[in-house]
């Protein structure tokens, strides 16, 4: 793709579905894990079931397991983008 700053993975903070995280966290026994379709010790990364795609004014990450919005970046609303960036920086301190 042209115009993209870098084709390397520059992700420093992962986005998670809160419900997926809670399910993994609450699963203690083999049975718990099998009920949610996970294996013991499974990482949030491999458990997540995300759909990522373009929308009319930006792009969206969607949890298909819970039909839940993870993030919807609206390119027309830069105020919202700056707020998200600020929040992320604060979370990393
Ligand atoms: Zn989820």
Image (spheres, grey):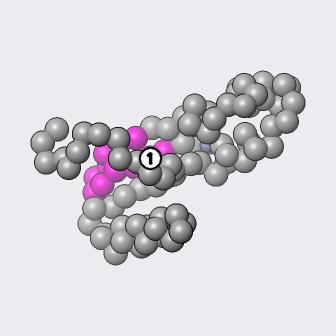
Residue appearing at x 67%, y 46% in the figure: 21
How far from the left and from the top, in percent, is residue 82?
36, 71
Magenta: main secondary structure: strand
58 inside magenta stretch? yes
Q: Nearer the viewer, residue 81 or 7?
A: 7
Q: Is residue 91 visible from the viewing direction of this image? A: yes
Q: Is residue 65 visible from the viewing direction of this image? A: no
Q: Nearer the viewer, residue 58 or 17?
A: 17
Farthest residue to the left: give it. Answer: 2
Q: Local crowd at mark 1 within 10 Å, few (<14), some, or many (≥20)? A: many
Count of numbered labels shown in the rendering: 1
Farthest residue to the front: give it. Answer: 93
Q: Which residues are magenta?
A: 52-62
Q: Secondary structure at mark 1?
A: strand
How far from the left and from the top, in percent, is residue 79?
34, 75
Residue appearing at x 84%, y 25% in the figure: 30
Residue appearing at x 76%, y 44% in the figure: 25
The image quadrant in which ligand 1 is located? top right
Q: Nearer the viewer, residue 12 or 69?
A: 12
Q: Is mark 1 within 8 Å of ligand 1?
A: no
How far from the left and from the top, in percent, is residue 71?
46, 55
Q: Nearer the viewer, residue 67 or 93?
A: 93
The quarter of the rendered structure image containing the N terminus is top left
Q: Quadrant of residue 45?
A: top right
Residue highlighted by disc 1: 61
Q: Is residue 10 left or right of residue 71?
A: left
Q: Is residue 29 left or right of residue 52?
A: right
Q: Is residue 41 left or right of residue 61?
A: right
How far from the left and from the top, in percent, is residue 20?
65, 43
Q: Does residue 56 lie above or below 41 as drawn? A: below
15 inside magenta stretch? no
């Amino acid at each position: 793709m042209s115009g993209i700053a870098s084709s390397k993975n520059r992700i420093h903070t992962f986005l998670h579905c809160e419900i997926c995280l809670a399910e993994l966290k609450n699963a203690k026994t083999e049975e718990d894990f099998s009920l949610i379709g996970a294996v013991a010790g499974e990482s949030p990364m491999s458990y997540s079931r995300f759909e990522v795609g373009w929308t009319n004014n930006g792009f969206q990450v969607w949890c298909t397991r819970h039909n839940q919005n993870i993030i919807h970046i609206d390119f027309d609303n830069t105020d919202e983008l700056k707020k998200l960036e600020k929040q992320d920086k604060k979370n990393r301190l």
